[in-house]
Image: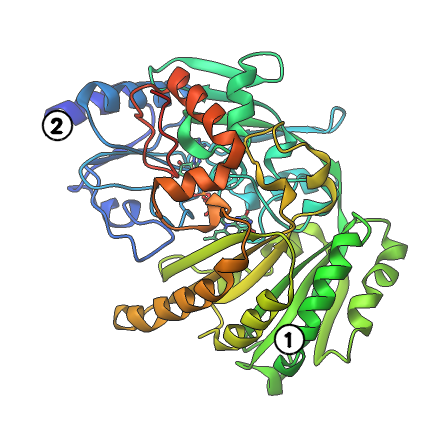
């Protein structure tokens, strides 16, 4: 039983704030990105440094409290909060130090991709992140990390050089290729299972101005466009990335008014190579059938990285389902063409990310992220505000996913799924699961870090 008094004890040990139900900011502090998750933690600790994290982890363990770890709070499964437990919310641990000579960045465990891109762009450098700037570096990269630089630079976690980790017994350890290399292997895709990462060291790449934007096609072209995309992107130059999307066109610039709120399909494109070659690289996609609209221009990389922020606001209800896919074969494309046009609003969609280029250069057993033999990941998401719409919205996602699933590769990208249970997690790590379970048993034998896509400690 955790009393007010014992929480006062935790407060006395931390430099950062500890928020409880009696505090004015509790109502906002308990909330995460997915408004569908409505939980009431006993306390929310906001550490300022590794010492605060160590004290918080020990407190949760000693008091027998359920422990949630929150980076950017975007995990749609809702593991960034809990009922009656302790939340370690890392959002105040935000420093980014760029070393332009070594092309590395040391990044606080609570940074968002917006924090990271802002800091590295000043030096003409970047590392692959996600496509929405408010998403956390922590959750996204620990689970893998797919985005506009995937084909050029690999997954976000492929770019880790080192991580500082507070493990379940409150120890502080460094994980890299030389020290605690088993932990380092597990962190690259294994999610939050192994401890709290207080800071990451990333490799950076020369990426400053990109040639990027969107190409939209009418729905009648959807099947042909998707087939073309699948063949084209897998063999395109690695400096080019493209994400295929079914969407509702946002009602504002740069889109022309006649297209506002229309269901369409399209590709979000990023060329991160030599600027004079951008137009030529994108040309085949533009020339495939006449697009209904295209917006492609040279832009600062952080501009692309924030482009989808307005259609990704926090607090809406989110229901997501996903799978890995080997090929965009006829059955899959036909299922997309049937259900993709049903995207219910501008906040929802069905996105297909490519797994090709640099991601394929890393063997599947070199990091925990195992599905490198797959070529695509799709995610279908309904995002809405009115809870009475839940049956209808979730039905669209489930029906869509069910039509695709028989043709999937068997597992799902853990960052794109809700809480779907242990078997689904095991399937998502494939051959790497048993090694992960052994490393889990070494660093977290009591499964203190279980609010995540959980890997059970090997028995
Ligand atoms: C709007 C939106 C856009 C997205 N776009 C992309 C995308 O382009 N590419 C992509 O790959 N994914 C994307 N995702 C999925 C995203 O990768 C996951 O939601 C991820 O979990 C978010 O990380 P977070 O830190 O924001 O979330 P949180 O909910 O804070 O974290 C998720 C989990 O990660 C762990 N965790 C987080 N930080 C730490 C840390 N420092 N130490 C230890 N454990 C930690 C915890 O177990 C936590 O439960 C998107 C999600 C949303 C909502």
Earlier along the polypeptide chain: callout 1 or callout 2? Answer: 2
* Residue at x 77%, y 60% (from the top left corner): 232
Asked whether, in this view, residue 212 is left or right of residue 199, the answer is: right
Q: Is residue 303 left or right of residue 60?
A: right
Instruction: Compare residues 84 and 401 and report the one nearer the observer.
Output: 401
Question: Does the rendering let one see residue 123?
Answer: no
**Which residue is nearer to you in this view: 254 or 360?**
360
User: Viewer-proximal residue, 133 or 458?
Assistant: 458
**Vertical side of 229 occupied by 454: above or below:** above
Secondary structure under the numbered disc 2 in the rendered image: loop
The alpha-carbon separation of the residues under discs 1 and 2 comes to: 56 Å
Please rate how many residues cluster around mark 2, counting C-alpha atoms within 10 Å: few if below 14, some from 14 to 19, many from 20.
some
Which secondary structure lies at badge 1?
Answer: helix
From the viewer's perspective, tell me whether residue 441 is left or right of residue 155. left
Which label sits in the foreground, 1 or 2? 1
Most extreme residue toward the bottom, as rendered?
258
Residue shown at 49%/46% (left/top)? 411
Other-residue count near label 1 (Cα within 10 Å), few / some / many at <14 / 14–19 / ≥20: many
> Which part of the image, by quadrant, shows the C terminus?
top left
Residue marked by disc 2: 2
Is residue 405 in sight in this rendering? yes
Q: How far across and how far down the image is residue 30, in percent?
A: 27, 45
The residue tagged 1 is 222
């Amino acid at each position: 039983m955790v009393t007010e008094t014992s929480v006062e004890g935790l407060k006395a040990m931390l430099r950062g704030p500890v928020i409880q139900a009696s505090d004015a900011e509790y109502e906002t502090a308990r909330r995460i990105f997915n408004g569908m998750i409505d939980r009431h933690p006993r306390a929310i600790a906001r550490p300022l440094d590794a010492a605060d994290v160590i004290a918080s982890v020990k407190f949760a363990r000693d008091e027998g409290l359920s422990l949630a770890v929150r980076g950017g709070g975007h995990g749609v499964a809702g593991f960034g909060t809990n009922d009656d437990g302790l939340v370690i919310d890392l959002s105040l641990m935000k420093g980014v130090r760029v070393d332009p000579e070594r092309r590395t960045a040391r990044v606080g465990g609570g940074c968002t991709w917006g924090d990271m891109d802002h800091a590295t762009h000043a030096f003409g450098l970047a590392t692959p992140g996600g496509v929405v700037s408010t998403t956390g570096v922590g959750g996204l990269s620990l689970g893998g990390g797919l985005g506009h630089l995937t084909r050029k630079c690999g997954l976000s976690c492929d770019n880790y050089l080192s991580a500082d980790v507070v493990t379940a017994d409150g120890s502080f350890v460094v994980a890299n290729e030389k020290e605690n290399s088993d932990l380092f292997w597990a962190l690259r895709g294994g999610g939050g299972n192994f401890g709290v990462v207080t800071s990451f060291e990333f490799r950076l790449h020369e990426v400053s101005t990109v040639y990027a934007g969107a190409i939209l096609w009418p729905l009648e072209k959807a099947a042909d466009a998707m087939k073309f995309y699948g063949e084209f992107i897998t063999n395109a130059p690695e400096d080019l990335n493209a994400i295929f999307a079914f969407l509702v066109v946002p009602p504002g610039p740069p889109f022309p008014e006649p297209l506002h709120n229309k269901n369409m399909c399209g590709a979000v494109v990023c060329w991160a190579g030599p600027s004079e070659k951008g137009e030529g690289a994108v040309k085949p996609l533009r020339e495939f059938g006449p697009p209904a609209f295209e917006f492609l221009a040279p832009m600062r990389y952080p501009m692309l990285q924030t482009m989808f922020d307005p259609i990704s606001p926090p607090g809406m209800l989110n229901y997501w389902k996903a799978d890995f896919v080997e090929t965009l074969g006829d059955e899959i494309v036909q299922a997309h063409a049937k259900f993709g046009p049903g995207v219910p609003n501008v906040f929802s969609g069905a996105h297909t990310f490519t797994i090709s280029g640099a991601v394929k250069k890393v063997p599947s057993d070199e990091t925990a992220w195992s599905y490198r033999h797959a070529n695509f990941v799709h995610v279908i998401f309904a995002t809405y505000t009115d809870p009475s719409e839940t049956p209808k919205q979730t039905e669209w996602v489930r029906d869509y996913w069910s039509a695709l699933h028989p043709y999937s590769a068997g597992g799902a990208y853990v960052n794109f799924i809700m809480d779907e249970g242990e078997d689904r997690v095991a399937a998502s790590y494939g051959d790497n699961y048993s090694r992960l379970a052994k490393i889990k048993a070494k660093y977290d034998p009591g499964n203190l870090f279980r609010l995540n896509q959980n890997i059970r400690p090997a028995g």
